Amino acid sequence: MSRLKKFLRSLAVILLIGGIVLFLLIRWSFEKVSLKEPRIFGVTYVAGFAEKFGMDRREVFLAILDELKAKYLRIPVYWDEAEPEDDHYDFSEVDWQLQEAERRVAKVILAIGRKLPRWPECHEPPWVKSQNQDSKSQKLLEHLEVVVNRYKDHPALSRWQVENEPFLPFGEDCLLFGGGFLDRELELVKRLDAHHPIVVTDSGELSIWVRALKRADIFGTTMYRRVWNENLGYFTYPLPPGFFRVKRAIAEFFVGPKPMFVSELQLEPWGPKLLYETPLEESLSRFGTSTFRENIEYAKKSGFDEFYLWGVEWSYWLKLQGHPEMWEEARKIIQSVP
C-alpha cells in the first residue's frame, strides 16, 4: 500500500504541476498572441486535382489569377510529374504556372519533396516505387537538387515548402522517412538556396508542432473543422479558435517564436469518397456557403493573419455546374485584404 500511496501522491503532484503549467500557457497565449486582422488570403492549387473534375488545368489556374485576383499561391511540384522517368524531367507545367504568376506579380510557395498536398500524399514516380528506402532517399535528394537549382532565382518564388506534414502518418502507401532524412532535405535546400525561407507544415488538430516548428523558418498548420473518419463518420472538431493560440504558445515555449500561417484552410467537404467521385448534391449538403463563412470567421479568431484556402478547384467546378456561390465567396475573401 505504501508504494501505491507514493505513486498516487507523485501522480497527483505531476497532474497539479501540469495543470498549473497548462493554465499559465493558456493565459500567456491569450496575452501574447493577440487577434490579428488578416493580411493574406492565398490559395493552394493542384492542377491534377482540377483535371479529376474534368476541367482544363490551365483554365482553372488563370481563373484563380484573373477572377479571384489571388496574389499568393502554394503549388506542389510533384515528383512523379516532374520526373516521370529516372533523370528525365518535365517542368513545362510548373514553368508555365510561375510565368503566369510573375506576369501578375503574384508570389508562389513551391512545395517540393515526396509527401505533398492531396491524396495519395506520397507522389512517387513508378520507376522508384520498387526500390529500397536508401535508394529512394538518394534519388529524392537528386530530384530536389534539380528542382531547387531550376527555380531558386525565379522572381515569383517566395518560399520553399519541404515535404507536407512530414510527421503525420497519412496517405496511401506513404511510409514516413523520419526526421533524420527531413533534416538532410532541409540542409540540401538551404545550401542550394540561402535566400528563400523554408516552410515546414504539421497537422493543426493531430500534432503538437514542436518537431516541425524547430526545423522551420516559417511554420504552416492545417485548419480543418468538419471531417470524416471510418470509425466515427462525419464529425466536427469540438475545438474553439483559441485552441490554436494555445498550441502556438506551447510550441513556442519549447522552440521560441517563429512566423506561422495556415497552409490549408478547409473550404471543401471531407467525406468517405474522393471529392470528384462524390455527387454534387451530397457534397453541397456537407459543405455549403454558410460553412464556408463559418470557417473563415473561425480562422480570423485563431491568432493567425495569413491563410491559404484549400478547395479552390472544387469551388470553380461548382461554378461550372451552375453553383457560383462558393467561388464568389472565395473571390470576396481574397480581395478583402490589400
Image (tube, helix red, strand yellow):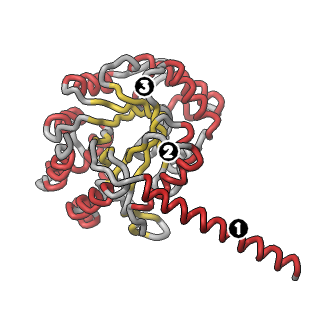
Instruction: Identify the residue at image location x=29%, y=54%.
Output: 267
Q: Residue 196 got which mark? A: 3
Q: Quadrant of residue 158?
A: top left
* Label 2, label 1: how far apart the Cα atoms are: 31 Å
Instruction: Identify the residue at image location x=24%, y=23%.
Output: 102
Question: Element under label 3?
Answer: loop
Q: Residue 14 got which mark? A: 1
Q: Residue 165 got which mark? A: 2
Given the current orientation, which residue lies at the most extreme right position?
2
Question: Element under label 1?
Answer: helix
Nearer mark to the viewer, of 3 and 1: 1
* Label 2, label 3: how far apart the Cα atoms are: 20 Å
User: Residue 243 location in percent, x, y?
Assistant: 44, 61
Which amino acid lies under the numbered mark 3 shown in the image of this protein? Answer: His
Instruction: Identify the residue at image location x=43%, y=21%.
Output: 195
Are the two marked residues, 2 and 3, in contact with CB atoms closer than 8 angstroms? no
Q: Residues within 10 Å of mark 1 (few under 14, many from 20)?
A: few
